[in-house]
Amino acid sequence: MLMDHWPLLGLRVNTPRLELRLPSEEELAQLADLAAEGVHEADRMPFIVPWTDLPPAERARSVVQHHWLRRGNWAPDDWALNLCVFKDGRVVGLQTITARDFAVLRQVSTASWLGVRHQRQGIGTEMRAAFLHLAFAGLGAVDALSGAFEDNPSSFAVSEKLGYELDGVDQWNVRGRRATMRRLRLARASWETHHRVPATISGLTPCLPLFGLPGVAAH
């Protein structure tokens, strides 16, 4: 079975409303269709790489290609896990967790997006909380990093709920303009004391070597 060679296919993170897992090829097409419908208002750009400026068909194709690229480039010391977010069996968005030298640094970064028709329902908070549970409870992370541009208050609201603290600023060229990104950091101790969404993890143990953690069991 393919899962014998790529056990990430069996990884699941569940919350009261959501399931996060790798998509089937048909579900990946649904994710691409969702991106084509829109991810944010046209007058702002929340991403460093402005992939959402592409025409809808090219935007959808880029989602598929990026998903395949992340799988193909996976290495235990440099990985990016892109899990589809499902609500009531429907694809609603994407949650990403990345790390380099995780076995040593125990530090991850997260990013995400939701289709416009699924926003402002608390899904963004719940899906990031699910990945934080995977990072801290499942993989034994020490820190989780994130960030958002100053004109993205909804992202900051999610981070504040989950206990992130400001960790400096970066400047980026976005659409030919200077944009300030505020870096955020969530320490394990803060995660343990702040807002927690109930979450469960299944299928993690056979995946641990892929995260650079042979012999480590999930908590």
Image (tube, rainbow, N blue to C red):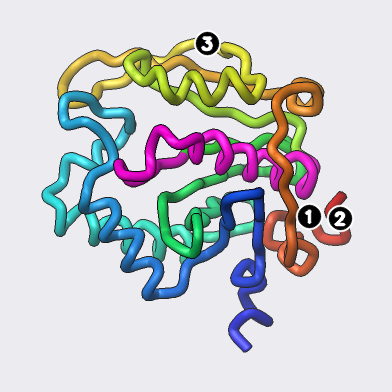
Q: Nearest the camera: 40 or 197?
A: 197
The residue singled out by tag 3 in the image is 168
Q: Quadrant of the N terminus?
A: bottom right
Up/down of 121 relative to 148, above or below: below
| View extreme (left): residue | 55
Q: Which mark is residue 216?
A: 2
- Determine whether label 1 and label 2 are within 8 Å by CB: yes
Up/down of 62 relative to 42, above or below: below
Tell me where the magenta segment starts and ends, as one range.
112-140
Residue 137 quadrant: top right
**Which residue does the image show at 60% across and 71% down from the upper left?**
9
Where does the image place residue 2, in percent across and percent down from the top left?
Answer: 59, 84
Give the mark nearest the N terminus, 3 or 1: 3
Amino acid at dot 3:
Gly
Amino acid at dot 2:
Val
- Determine whether label 3 and label 1 are within 8 Å by CB: no
Give neighbour class at mark 1: few <14, some 14-19, many 20+ (Cα, 10 Å).
some
The residue singled out by tag 1 in the image is 213
